[in-house]
Image (cartoon, rainbow, N blue to C red):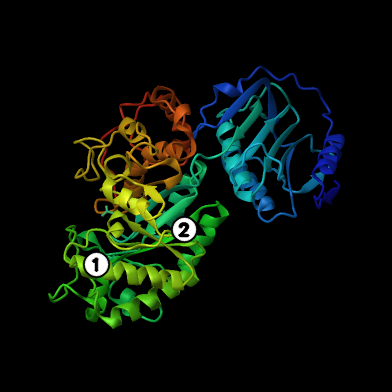
Amino acid sequence: MKQLAFKLTQTLFVILLVVACTSPKKKIDYPKTDLAQNSLIPKPAKVIATNSAFGLDSSTAIFTNQTFKGFEEVGSYLSEKLKEKLNLDIPVNTFDSETVERIIFINQTDSLELQSEEAYELYIKNDSILINAKTAAGAFRGIQTLRQLLPEKSNDTLSDAPMWLIPSGKILDEPNFDYRGAMLDVARHFFTVDEVKRFIDLLAYYKFNTFHMHLTDDQGWRIEIKSWPKLTEIGAQTEVGGGKGGFYTQEEFKEIVAYAAERHIEIIPEVDMPGHTNAASFAYPVLNGNGLPVQNYIGTRVGFSTFDARKDTVYAFLDDVVREIAAISPSKYFHIGGDESHVTKKKDYIHFVEKVEKIVQKHGKQAIGWNEIAQAAIDSSTVGQLWNEPESALAAAAKGSKILMSPAKKAYLDMQYDSLSVHGLHWAAYIEVDEGYNWDPETYVEGLSKDQILGIEAPLWSETISNSAELEYLAFPRAIGYAELGWTKAEDRNWEDYKKRLADQQPFLDENDVNYYPSSKVDWKKKKDIYKKIEKN
Ligand code: ACM
């Protein structure tokens, strides 16, 4: 066996070379398949079927551009996923002339028809699959599409070994919004590094590109700050209901950031303030501004805590916190919270937000804050995250800020599906799967235009959930719909069409043991007990 390592530089040269070396030993008579009958989510911008197939089998190899950063890693990720799902060993950038008959080529090019940094083109022919992308992120989105096109069953009649038929044709695709996020509250209940990674893996499959971590709240502080050690020695040891809490060391946070980055997902850290700060004040009572003795807190009330917005020590503390987190967080954004500061006087709140925004900028980041921050004279680079007051979003937009759309009534993953849901809350709404899908982030706030909207994010608050199974009950399948709201243009979205594609996600969800809620709004092929309470793992 002859192994040749390839350094791929010239796209055309490589394609010609590989195709020349891989002329099929035996002509395969592919059955008709229809790419247009796919169940892709998010729905791609353009699909053209050519009614034949690519035969994926053990004589397939992956080649990638090796000069642009990240393309080879995208190839390796695809190879890993093919191994996991099909138990196929597909080599990446090594060439065995005796066995390779078909190739998947992941190519960098600047000449794409579509403009987005995450755009990709996918060309599927009998003997080759070509993914063109400007960036590794685009290539990564493209291979998620390819993963979704893998059939559940191999065809064992076309050749000696099992072959998985991928319908042939062409897909041109790009996201409608640059920011497509989910949020996890790791403060009300702590989620381990592995639980966070598992959620990130699922989000990656649906082309999310942002994961916001709500790292601090009244019930717990979850990130190591070396210059203020009691935050984790004391402030991290509690959670809702009295569990033991937990925190991420800075090394663990970096591990999550790196894991997400491999999936082209950016982590956005949030330190919620000046309210939602009981855990920090419990660790360091000097920070407290509500005039009451500080106790640890394991309940679910909101709005009783505040930092002292007039104390220099508070800003010295925040300078250290933002500096330490900014140093391990590559995102350009730093989320400062700002919601529900009900015991902070309005003038103190405004003073606080304006000072903290400057601290965030000093450490090289742009601030994001919940919609209440629009009361302050925020900078146009600061992003307002709409959750409860459309007029606040309009006020922030009037100051030049971009708006991130997370309306609680539509996009909160912790809202119950209906009154029988075994987890979740319903203070904003019951959000069935169709209700979560049937709205348009572009028209939700009258007076806000598309260019003022950064994107969409679906927050998952964790008052009622404390492990992956419970998280997944609330997040899935609704997060899949939010993926489509962020990626697919409004004119291409339709509930009747979406719900069929959603039902077809069931094999993926089952194979990955995702504890999704089997909503009666969807015609699932396999029935599942809808109100089953999850045993703690
Ligand atoms: C929030 O739900 N308090 C942002």
- Position of residue 44 in the picture relative to residue 453 (left or right): right
Q: Is residue 41 above or below residue 408?
A: above
**What amino acid is labelled 2 in the image?**
Ile
Q: Position of residue 358 (x, y in %)?
A: 39, 71
Q: CA distance from mark 1 to mark 2?
A: 27 Å
User: Where does the image place residue 123, in percent across and percent down from the top left?
Assistant: 69, 32
Q: Nearer the viewer, residue 6 or 385?
A: 385
Image coords of residue 533 (percent x, y): 25, 41
Mark 2 is surrounded, within 10 Å at the Cα level, by few (under 14), some (14 to 19) or many (20 or more) other residues, namely: many
For discs 1 and 2, the disc positioned in front in the rendered view: 1
- Taking depth in this image into account, of 277 and 368 the one nearest to the observer is 368
For mark 2, give the secondary structure: strand
Please tell me which residue is depicted at 37% across the width and 50% down the height of the picture.
468
The reply to whether the C-beta atoms of the residues labelled 1 and 2 are less than 8 Å apart is no
Amino acid tagged 1: Tyr
Q: x and y percent of residue 299 in the render?
A: 17, 60
Task: Report if the beta carbon of the residue with label 1 is closer than 8 angstroms to ligand 1.
Answer: no
Q: Nearer the viewer, residue 127 or 308?
A: 308
**Mark 2 or mark 1, which is nearer the start of the sequence?**
2
Q: Is residue 76 visible?
A: yes
Which residue is at a point 53% across and 40% down the rendered structure image? 175
Image mark for residue 267? 2
Is residue 466 shown above or below 365?
above
Residue tagged by mark 1?
349
Looking at the image, residue 315 lies above or below residue 32: below
Q: Secondary structure at mark 1?
A: helix
The answer to whether residue 20 is left or right of residue 534 is: right
Figure quarter occupied by ligand 1: bottom left
Residue 496: quadrant of the picture? top left
Residue at the extreme left of the image, as rendered: 292
